[in-house]
Structures are given as structure tokens and as C-alpha cells.
Image (cartoon, rainbow, N blue to C red):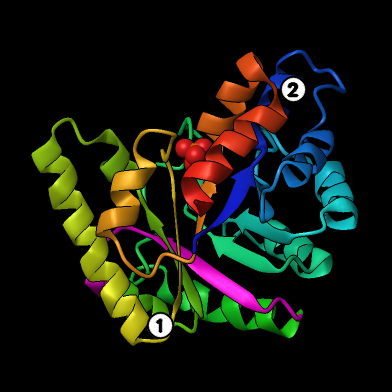
């Protein structure tokens, strides 16, 4: 069975658009958990465009399920992550000009920095360290080499596939990556662009995915039907 972790960054984006105190992502996280989510994900960006340090500290105190802290390898956020001690740290690439994370890490070119950061995260008693990577067997092998014990596969290309053939082709690449990761003993997560319509095909064609991280689709639906209903609907799809 696949676990559903919900990314609440977009609740903070809405709050910050009016420089307000609401809607509060901490409040949203509690509603997500009450409606059946297995955990909460946030990305503390270097520019603090959505989640703030205040949110992070309160989420740490209030989230009951798995807490996934997405971060770049920038020194400042690595320090905060070590201090907060989430259950899972997911290292992602970060560019200021992007609207959202646009692709996976190039593990080989970031290798030296990753080899410094990953042991510090384990030393801070963070049990699971994932690298967000594209569906590429070489990246999976590089993730294991630099010491990660998990990967999150980028599903953006899968979500953007324009035709059924294209979707199948990308799903095959994802499946090759998960098979390799499984053989290497890595835990396997997936996320980006997953929604109420495209998840079932992924679930049928890509084995070994233990958890998915879904944000935009759920927050967008919550605007229309309420957070708890939006989460319950996604739980039925992801968790069966
Ligand atoms: N996983 C990672 C690493 C991400 O950066 C994001 C986007 O913040 C997600 C998952 C969730 O993507 P979406 O909001 O499209 O569901």
C-alpha cells in the first residue's frame, strides 16, 4: 500500500499573497491528518516565499504522522533541518526564478556537497534522507553511492505527458528506476504533478512506490470542496 503525504506549501503561498496570518498551513496540516493523510510535507525555501521558520517549528510540534522537510543543500536550511529533526529530509534542487521545483537533482555534479550534508542529517538523528531525482537509473545508483537511504522520483514528466503513449513511456522509465532502487535497498517515494486522475495509472505501472507527496492538486481542490473532503478523496485513490 502507498502512503499519502500532503505538501501544504500552497496554503502558505495563499497566506503570503496577502501578507496575512491565514490560511495557516499548520491548521491545514491538522485537517489533512484528521482526514487520513499519513504525513505532511513542506519545503523551506531559501527565499521563504511560502513556508516560514515559524511554520516549520509549529509543524514539528503538531504533526502526528510522518514529517517530510524538503530542502536544498544551502548551509542555513541544512542547519534548521538538523535542529528540527523531521522524520524525513528530502534534498531538492532550488532555483530562485522557478515557479516550483522543475526537475531532479543532478547527483553526480552535486556529489561533494551531498557527501558533506547527508551524514550531518543522519547525525542529527533524522532517520531517512531522500534525494529528489529524475527517473534515471544512473541517478538512482549515484543516490545510493552518496549515502541516501531513500529517493523521491520526480513525476513531473509523467504528469505532463500529452498522450497515452508518452505516459506509458515515462511510466516505463519510472519503473526501471524503482526496480533498480528496490534492488539497492533504497526506500522509494514519488511526487510532483500527481493528481486525482493520473495517480491510478502510475500505481498500476510503477512498482515499489512506498509513499507519494502530493500538494497542488489537493490544495486546489480544497478551495472548492474543503480540505477534509479533498484529502479523503485522494486517500481513497492512493490508499484504496
Ligand atoms: N515533491 C517535491 C520534491 C516537490 O518539490 C513538490 C512540489 O513542491 C512536490 C513533491 C509536490 O508537487 P505538487 O504540488 O505538484 O503535488
Magenta stretch in the rendered image: 125-139
Whether residue 134 can be seen here: yes
**Left or right: 65 in relation to 159:** right
Per the image, label 2 sits on a secondary structure element best described as helix
| Residue 179 quadrant | bottom left
Q: Which mark is residue 144?
A: 1
| Residue 48 quadrant | top right
Circle 1 crowding by C-alpha within 10 Å: few under 14, some 14–19, many from 20: some
Whether residue 94 can be seen here: no
Placement of 52 over or under 172, stated as above or below: above
Q: Position of residue 180 (x, y in %)?
A: 27, 78
- Would you name the residue on which mark 2 appears? 16
Placement of 236 over or under 205, stated as above or below: above
Q: Is residue 196 magenta?
A: no
Q: Position of residue 101 (x, y in %)?
A: 46, 42
Tell me whether circle 2 and circle 1 mark residues in contact (CB < 8 Å). no
Q: Residue at the location (72% across, 39% down)?
A: 51
Q: Is residue 133 magenta?
A: yes
Q: Which mark is residue 58?
A: none
Chain-order first, disc 2 or disc 1:
2
Q: Residue at the location (74% across, 65% down)?
A: 86
Q: Residue at the location (82% across, 64% down)?
A: 84
Placement of 235 over or under 149, stated as above or below: above
Per the image, label 1 sits on a secondary structure element best described as helix
Amino acid at each position: 500500500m502507498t502512503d499519502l503525504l500532503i505538501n501544504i506549501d500552497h496554503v502558505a503561498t495563499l497566506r503570503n499573497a496577502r501578507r496575512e496570518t491565514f490560511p495557516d498551513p499548520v491548521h491545514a496540516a491538522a485537517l489533512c491528518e484528521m482526514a487520513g493523510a499519513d504525513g505532511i510535507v513542506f519545503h523551506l525555501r531559501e527565499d521563504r516565499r511560502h513556508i516560514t521558520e515559524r511554520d516549520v517549528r509549529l509543524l514539528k510540534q503538531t504533526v502526528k504522522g510522518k514529517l517530510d522537510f524538503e530542502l536544498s543543500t544551502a548551509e542555513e536550511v541544512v542547519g534548521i533541518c538538523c535542529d528540527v529533526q523531521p522524520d524525513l529530509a528530502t534534498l531538492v534542487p532550488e532555483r530562485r526564478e522557478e515557479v516550483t521545483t522543475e526537475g531532479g537533482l543532478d547527483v553526480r555534479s552535486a556529489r561533494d556537497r551531498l557527501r558533506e550534508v547527508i551524514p550531518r542529517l543522519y547525525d542529527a538523528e533524522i532517520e531517512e534522507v531522500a534525494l529528489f531525482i529524475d527517473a534515471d537509473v544512473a541517478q538512482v545508483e549515484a543516490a545510493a553511492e552518496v549515502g541516501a537511504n531513500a529517493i523521491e522520483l520526480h513525476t513531473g514528466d509523467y504528469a505532463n505527458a500529452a498522450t497515452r503513449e508518452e505516459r506509458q513511456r515515462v511510466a516505463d522509465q519510472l519503473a526501471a528506476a524503482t526496480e533498480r532502487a528496490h534492488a539497492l535497498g533504497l526506500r522509494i517515494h514519488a511526487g510532483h504533478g500527481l493528481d486525482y486522475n493520473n495517480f491510478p495509472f502510475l500505481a498500476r505501472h510503477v512498482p515499489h512506490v512506498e509513499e507519494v507527496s502530493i500538494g497542488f492538486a489537493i490544495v486546489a481542490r480544497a478551495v472548492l470542496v474543503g480540505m477534509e473532503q479533498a484529502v479523503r478523496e485522494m486517500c481513497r485513490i492512493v490508499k484504496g
